[in-house]
Image (tube, coloured by chain):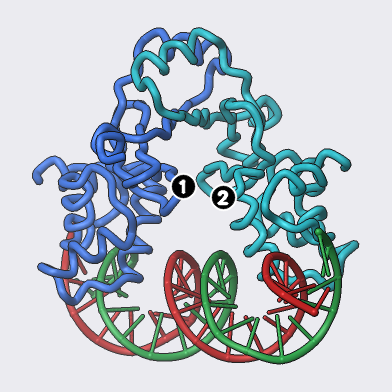
Chain colours: A blue, B cyan, C green, D red
DNA sequence: TTCTGTGCAAATCTTTTGCATGGCA
DNA sequence: TGCCATGCAAAAGATTTGCACAGAA
């Protein structure tokens, strides 16, 4: 919680309860869509507006405090951290962070030097595979 | 053009000028969003409706004739082909197909066996880098 | 006190749906 | 001819904007 506050302190954005609530939600869930953020926050913060969530998501992205990740359904957001890959289950939509092997990192760095990369691996997660 | 027709023939979908136009557009552009498809088609097919594009994109996806690819802006679509990665320029939005090295394929197969994967590499393309 | 952030309501944009008509097989 | 596909208009959903007020620094 204290770290979340410092994310804002290091930016040009002011610290507000709404922003802390959004960051807290993302910290807890790992990845969440606008809708998920809103629905979870409104329970303990009933006066918050959807427009505020949208505005702040944009502001936090611009400051690189959060990142947008890309799944086939809704865009989701996460607190910006070390580059890593995402595994996204095509059935249940669950998102997991994937530690990339050094091999892959090198290989891709070789093909696309000097540029940031993001990797997404779409598949069926264990839980969904077992249910088939 | 003849191949596009056969894509439909092999499916349960009927052959219509609208569907052929959509496939032709995707074949020509490689990747295009709903909006791009609509704007390009309407020039030589003024009576086509946006709703028809939406309905057909859904139908073509369901038949696996086209695939949705995932970029941070709008979803784009392409004619389904061999598994490959996409390089997406974060500045200009250009999408390029990336032939994955066997090394990477093996590596990822090892980590996530028996599941389909899609890889996206976000970076800055050469043209944009030169303009910096 | 100043200026940014919030919340409401309205506007805008995107996507979906229902239905009558048209057109492929 | 029988159905599926189309196109229109309306509905539904998602996102953005303007503005007055509230609250952080």
Placement of D14 over or under B6, stated as above or below? below
The x, y position of residue A54, in whole percent, is 37, 63
Residue at x-position 29% and y-position 31%: A97
The quadrant where residue A20 appears: bottom left
Chain on which label 1 sits: A
The x, y position of residue A62, in whole percent, is 41, 48
Q: Nearer the viewer, residue A85 or B82?
A: B82
Using residue C16 as the reference point, say whether residue A121 is left or right of it. left
The x, y position of residue A11, in whole percent, is 29, 45
Q: Secondary structure at mark 1?
A: loop
Q: Secondary structure at mark 2?
A: loop
To which residue does mark 2 refer? Answer: B75
Do the dots labelled 2 and 1 sit on one chain? no
Chain on which label 2 sits: B
Residue at x-position 19% and y-position 52%: A25
Placement of C13 over or under B37, stated as above or below? below
Residue at x-position 66% and y-position 44%: B65
Residue at x-position 25% and y-position 35%: A130
Crowding at mark 2 (Cα within 10 Å: few <14, some 14-19, many 20+): some
Which numbered tag is attached to residue A72? 1
Using residue B43 as the reference point, say whether residue C19 is left or right of it. left
Using residue A38 as the reference point, say whether residue A116 is left or right of it. right
Marks 2 and 1 in Cβ contact (< 8 Å): yes
Placement of A72 over or under C23, stated as above or below? above
């Amino acid at each position: 919680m204290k770290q979340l506050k410092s994310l804002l302190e290091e930016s040009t954005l002011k610290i507000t309860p709404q922003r802390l609530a959004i960051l807290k939600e993302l910290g807890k869930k790992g990845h969440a869509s606008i809708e998920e953020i809103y629905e979870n926050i409104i329970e303990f913060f009933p006066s918050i507006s959807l427009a505020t969530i949208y505005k702040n998501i944009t502001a936090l992205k611009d400051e690189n405090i959060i990142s947008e990740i890309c799944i086939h359904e809704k865009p989701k957001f996460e607190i910006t951290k070390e580059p890593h890959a995402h595994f996204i289950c095509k059935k249940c939509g669950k998102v997991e962070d994937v530690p990339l092997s050094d091999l892959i990192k090198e290989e891709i760095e070789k093909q696309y030097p000097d540029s940031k990369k993001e990797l997404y691996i779409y598949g069926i997660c264990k839980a969904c595979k077992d249910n088939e």
